[in-house]
Image (cartoon, rainbow, N blue to C red):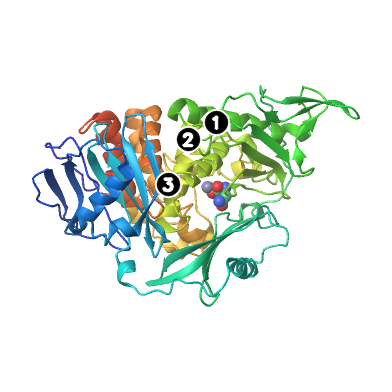
Amino acid sequence: MKKKYVVPAVLSSALIVSSFTASSVLAVNVPETANVQAQKEWNENANVPIFVKEKFAEKHTTNKASKAKAHLQNNKQTYGIENAEENLDVKDVQTDELGMTHVRLIQTKDGIPVEGSEVIVHYNENDELVSVNGHHNPEIDSTTLDTTPDISKEKAIDLAKTAVNAPDQLDYEPTSELVIYPFQEEHYVTFKVNLTFTTDEPGNWFVFVDANDGTVIDQYNTISHAKHGELHKSVGTGVLGDHRKIHTTKVKEPKSGTQFTLSDNSHEGLEGIYTYDVNTGEIATNNSASWKDEYHRPAVDAHYNSEKVYEYYLNEHDRNSLDDEGMAIVSRVNYGDNYNNAFWDGRQMTYGNGDGSFMVPLSAGLDVAAHEMTHGVITNSANLVYRGQSGALNEAFADIFGALVDEDDWEVGEDIMGPDAKADGRTALRSLSDPSKFPVNEDYVPYSNNGGMYPSHMDEFYELPTDLDNGGVHINSSIINHAAFITGEQIGKEKLGQIYYRALVTYLTANSNFSDARNAIIQSAEDIYGEGSEEALAAADGFDQVGIYE
Ligand code: ASN
Ligand code: ZN
């Protein structure tokens, strides 16, 4: 039996979740001032309080953003943020359906953002500041950095293109933004360059180019390359046969006559749902309103599942599309050759058709579509860095919402496995209920001691280097997946979705780790269902049982 986390009986009505870390957790001292009701809970292992509850009575405020900064400034002792007024920029202010307001701030130096260092200040419906969380990098303030770039942002783009072997033709105008990048104990002033392209090895690259000497400090791709396809080779079964109702557009062209396209403009406030065929580069088109050709099946599924996922986020979470502002939902199908994967490239979804042996066209999986679209939701919310634990959280949230949208089971990818995979016992890609029923890629086996299966407890964590699956983003995600499953079994999928969604959009930040996820998820459960509620206890129990105790 693993250590059991016991929720204290006495809980104040408001919380501060202060888990400030750069690379380590910093001590947080609560100021003993008259307007503070403070209560601490000690993290016995780390011997620092990382979970502090307090309530600051604040007068009604018209400008919460400046209030938030002033609070951090005035309580420098507690938070350890030097000169918050000057060194934090407001990124976003949002009020949620509970009436709470969340001010998201990003750390800066000389006006330049520090990559991944975000702090969120939360106010309750009475405008009282109730909690603060995030990651702040205290070393930056005392580090001397030359923040005037010696190379141009265009030069940085060129260097980045060379570094990742980008083709001439990119999918989008590259972006290049000056950021301070903490990397391997050092701090660099860099251009963060984003390059997106669709070659045989598709890329959504982030490259950090030193702004002074043009050296590439670091780079990563959020699209990984499937190796599954090499396992078997035979002929596929084709697709499913489900009958789908889909929204399309009827177009009358003088030359070609009446045509129908997979463009769905039926949702008010949404810019539309569009499904493109990579083979033509156009929106999938048919001569008839009946889409029965074998050829169109992957497109029909992508289109249909996009709408399902859109409706899930709208109906369950009042979220209007991936950015919550009605952005168009775009998918591409028939990608690649025997391509056993699907991906979100930072802006849209792309689906391969599988090799017919290991996988069938991936758009057939509602959970696959929900997984990829959730990456889009994450890009537009917590924006979890696709590396190490934050990357594994990114993957876990994608899997968890996959299993919530495609609600019949706790498996991911069960509808897209091909005949040979199934014959081999690979009946799904991953399992939230029992991660260890499937083996990981053989290259990863030596990095854990659990016999080469997906992990379901921190004892089985895969210590992978960053060049293997970005540090195990698709592997260690299973630990969080399993925590969600345990909670979901106790309170049901609907409440699980409410809690995890709130954690994702309200508390998690770019550099959040597993411990932050525990705090964020328990806090979210308490916000919605109350402290000490069955739901909050179930949320904590999920993390306890996978060995994430604080
Ligand atoms: N299907 C994969 C995923 O969404 C693609 C990737 O490697 N990012 O995680
Ligand atoms: Zn993913």
Dot placed on the residue nearer the N-terminal end, 1 or 2: 1
Q: 84 and 369: which one is in front? A: 84
Task: Determine the residue located farthest toward the front in the rendered image.
Answer: 62
Q: How far across and how far down the image is residue 403, in percent?
A: 48, 35
Res. 382 mark: 3
Residue ID for mark 2: 403
Vertically, is 407 above or below 480? Answer: above
Q: 342 and 306: which one is in front? A: 306
Q: Amino acid at mark 1?
A: Tyr
Task: Determine the residue located farthest toward the right in the rendered image.
Answer: 255
What whole-number distance in Å separates the C-alpha atoms at marks 1 and 2? Answer: 15 Å
What whole-number distance in Å separates the C-alpha atoms at marks 3 and 2? Answer: 20 Å
Q: Residues within 10 Å of mark 1 (few under 14, many from 20)?
A: many
Residue ID for mark 1: 310
Q: Residues within 10 Å of mark 2 (few under 14, many from 20)?
A: many
Dot placed on the residue nearer the N-terminal end, 3 or 2: 3
Residue 514 seen in render: yes
